[in-house]
Amino acid sequence: MTAERARITVFDTTLRDGEQSPGCSMNQQEKLRLAHQLDRLGVDVIEAGFPIASDGDFESVRAIASVVRRPVIAGLARACRPDIERAWEALRDAARPRIHVFLATSDIHLKYKLRITRDQCVEQAREAIHFAKSLCDDVEFSPEDATRTDPDFLCRVLEAVVEAGATTLNIPDTVGYTVPTEFGDLITTIRQRVKGIENVTISAHCHNDLGMAVANALAAVSAGARQVECTINGIGERAGNASLEEIVMAMRVRPDRFAYETGIVGDQIFAASQMLSEITGVPVQPNKAIIGRNAFAHEAGIHQDGVLKNPLTYEIMTPQSVGVPDSKLVLGKHSGRHALSIRCEQLGYQFDRRGLDDIYRRFVRLADKIKHVEDHHLLELIRDTHKPSGSATPLIEPIAPAKAAVVNAPPPVSEPEPEPMKAFPVGPQTNAFGVPLPVHGDSHHEQTQQEDYLWGV
Ligand code: KIV
Ligand code: ZN
C-alpha cells in the first residue's frame, strides 16, 4: 500500500536570485533559452526576474511571460507602487502571472537599511499587498531576513498580508543563518499562530551560507511548507540558494523520510544544469551532488568492482534518473583488475589471467605517473605489452581510439553470479566501437526491470 504523497510546488529562481550571483548574469536570449528548459524540467513557477532593476530585466520577464505558457511566471518587486506597477507591466501578458513582493522584517534591516519602525513595516507590507492584489490574483509575500526576525513580529506581519490578499507566504532565510530544526519550528509556529494561514501556501527560500540550504528547505517541507524556492546548480547570492536537483532527488531517493512529490521531470535535470553552466560560463564543482562530474564516477577498485557487479552497491540513484548518460569508471591508480578488464574488452581486447596481470602491473605504474589513464594510453599499453605473439585476443580489429570511458557493463562470465536484486536500467552494452558485448545472463541487468529506476521508489 502506498501512502498519498503531498505535492510540493517547485519555484525556480535561477533567473532572478540565481542571476544575482557573481558571474551569472544572463541576457534576454539566454534567459529565454533557460526558461524553455525550466519548462521542460517541469518546474511549477519560474521567477523570471526583477523588472524594476533594469530595462533588460524588464524585457526578459516580458518575453518569458509571453512565450512560456505552462508554468506560473513570477516577477519580483519591493513593497512600493513603482516596483509593483513595473512588475505587473512585465507580467500582464503571462498565462499565469504572479507578483512577488518583499519587505525586510528583521530589526537589523528595519533599523540600518530601511530606517522604519515595526509599525511602519506592517503598514507598508499591508498596503503593498493590497495594491498588488488589485492587479493580480496570485500574490506572494516575502518577509526578507525572516529567520532573524522576532517570531511574534513576523507572525504579525504575515497576518496583515494574508488579510490583504497574499496567496503565498514565502519565508526567506536570506542570510543562510538558520539550522534545520530551528527552521522547521519556525514554520510550525507560523502555521499555529497566523490567522488565515490555512488558506495560503507556505514557502521556504533558503540560502547556503552555512551549507544547510537544502536541509533547511527539507525541514520546512516536513513542517508543512508546500513550496520550495530553489535554483539549478544551487547558484545564487553569495554561497547560493538551495539546489533544485538536491531537494527533488532527496525526495525521490528517500520517500520514506520525505513522502512528497514534485512535477520535476528527472531526466531533464542534467540538461538544465549543463545549459546553465554553458550560458554563464560558471562550471559545476566536480563533486557537486547529483550533477557534478564525479557524482556517478568511481575510481577506487573496490567500488568499481562493486558497481560492475551491481550498481546498487555504490549508487543510490541511477545516472539515467537525472539525465546523466551513464556511470563512469575512471581508470586511475585506485582502480582494480575488474574495471581494467572491462575497459579493455570495450576497447576490443580480452585477456587471460596472466595477460591481464601483465597489463595491470604496467597500468598501475602509468596511473601513478599520469593520474588518469585515457583510452589512448590504454591502447598503447596493450599494444606495447602484447606485441603480435602476446596473449591478447582481439575481439575485433580496433580502428580508432574510443570515446571517454563510460562503463556500466555486465560482469565477465568468470564472475560469480550476483544475488538477485532490484534492477537499475542499463542500456544495450556495446564495446567502444559500437559492437554489442556478450550478455552474461545475470537477471539484475535485464531490460524488463528497467522501469524501477530508483530502488525504494
Ligand atoms: O533571500 C531573500 O530574502 C530573497 C527575497 C527577495 C525573497 O531573495
Ligand atoms: Zn534569496
Image (spheres, rainbow, N blue to C red):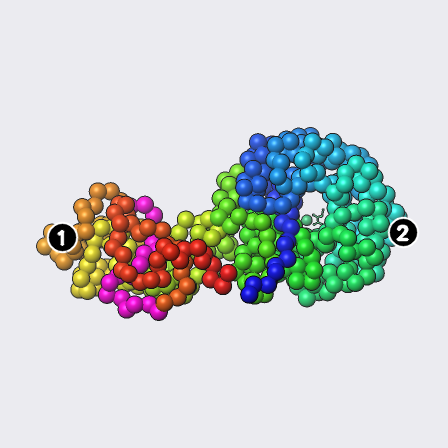
Residue type beneath disc 2 = Asp
Q: Which mark is residue 387?
A: 1
- Residue that lies at the very extreme toward the left in this rendered image: 389
- 145 to 278, vertically: above or below: below
| Left or right, residue 268 beside residue 203 | left
Separation of marks 1 and 2 at Cα, in angstroms: 86 Å
Total marks shown come to: 2
**Disc 1 on helix, strand or loop?**
loop
- 40 to 309, vertically: above or below: above
Front residue of 271/179: it is: 271
Q: Position of residue 6 (x, y in %)?
A: 64, 57
- Callout 1–callout 2 Cβ contact below 8 Å: no
Is residue 412 magenta-colored? yes
The segment highlighted magenta reads 402-419
Specify the quadrant that holds the N terminus.
Answer: bottom right
Ligand 2 is within 8 Å of the C-beta of the residue at disc 1: no
* Foreground tag (1 vs 2): 2
Residue at screen point 41% across, 55% down: 450
| Left or right, residue 331 beside residue 48 | left
Q: Position of residue 193 (x, y in %)?
A: 81, 61
Is residue 261 magenta-colored? no
Q: Position of residue 238 (x, y in %)?
A: 63, 50
Residue at screen point 81% across, 55% down: 196
Q: Residue under circle 2? A: 119
Residue at screen point 58% across, 38% down: 35
The dominant secondary structure in magenta is loop
The picture quadrant where one finds residue 183 is bottom right
Residue at screen point 35% across, 57% down: 446
Q: Position of residue 39 (x, y in %)?
A: 57, 41
